[in-house]
Amino acid sequence: MRTQQLERNLVERVAMGDLMRRRARDSGSLPALVDFYHNERRTVTYSELNKKVNKLANALMREGIKQGDKLAMLAVNQIDVVVTYFACYKLGVIAVPINFMQSVADVTFNIEHSGSKVVVFDPLLSDLVFASTNNNDDIHFTIQLGQDKGKATFAFEPFIKEHSDTEIEDRIINDRDTAHMIYTSGTTSKPKAVETSHLSLTIAALTAAIELELSAQCKMLLVLPLFHCTALSILYPTFLRSGCC
């Protein structure tokens, strides 16, 4: 029965992780993302990006992260932030991007209120992360982006290095399952978590592609930080072009 449900789900569902898989299948050799990090220009193809997403997803599973768990992210815009988002989407893990320009108190609240079990963060933000998680017993482990782990449990690159890049195909994900939670700024009270479904994100991406008249030749500059919902809605059409879906 489980196998039949899974097979039907894989055919019928609208899930963000599937967009990455299809894009890698159809346009694997094309450049997907370019970033400038520590004065270095880096680029990755759709195939390379998808494989790295799968490696992270398999590594998280190996450490006991389950569907429905929350994963918090604090990082400046870079390729591995996108990798982390899509690893969450494929696993059915809920991504919790956090505004690192908030106070320690607000970041602490966001992480604790979300019930995040993992924190993935940029080395530039390590002091903020550990000031916000020192007394949080719900955190199972932390991952610092890059080669060095610093005070974190794991460093990102060694964490995923030995893991398989095979697809995650054992998850039943429904259209209205939560894909990520983005916290409000908390202007008049504590920040509130806004849950966004896989279906909602897909519709937002399709709408942006249509309204902005995007083509396969389009390139998009991301100026807003990736914890911001508007930046996310602009990013997704890059995975929806050229017959991806």
Image: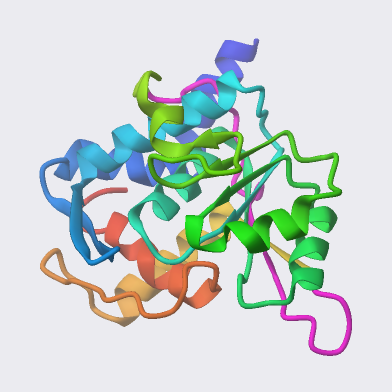
How far across and down, in percent of the image, does residue 158 sit? 41, 29
Residue 12, placed above or below residue 66? below
The residue closer to the viewer here, 212 or 4, is: 212
Residue 182, placed above or below residue 79? below
- The residue furthest front is 150
Q: Is residue 62 left or right of residue 54?
A: right
How far across and down, in percent of the image, does residue 42 sit? 20, 56
The secondary structure that dominates the magenta segment is loop
The residue closer to the viewer here, 99 or 53, is: 99
The residue closer to the viewer here, 239 or 206, is: 239
Dividing the picture into quarters, in which one does residue 50 lie? Answer: top left
Which residue is located at x 66 percent, y 32 percent? 67
Q: Is residue 190 magenta?
A: yes
Dividing the picture into quarters, in which one does residue 147 lie? Answer: top left
How far across and down, in percent of the image, does residue 141 sit? 67, 35
Q: Is residue 196 visible?
A: no
Which residue is located at x 71 percent, y 38 percent? 69
Q: What's the magenta region?
A: 167-192
Dividing the picture into quarters, in which one does residue 3 lie? Answer: top right
Query: Quadrant of the image for the N terminus?
Result: top right
- How many numbered markers are drawn? 0
Q: Is residue 200 visible?
A: yes
Q: Is residue 240 left or right of residue 114?
A: left
The residue closer to the viewer here, 219 or 39, is: 39
Which residue is located at x 37 percent, y 74 percent? 208
How far across and down, in percent of the image, does residue 47 sit? 21, 38
Residue 239, placed above or below residue 51? below
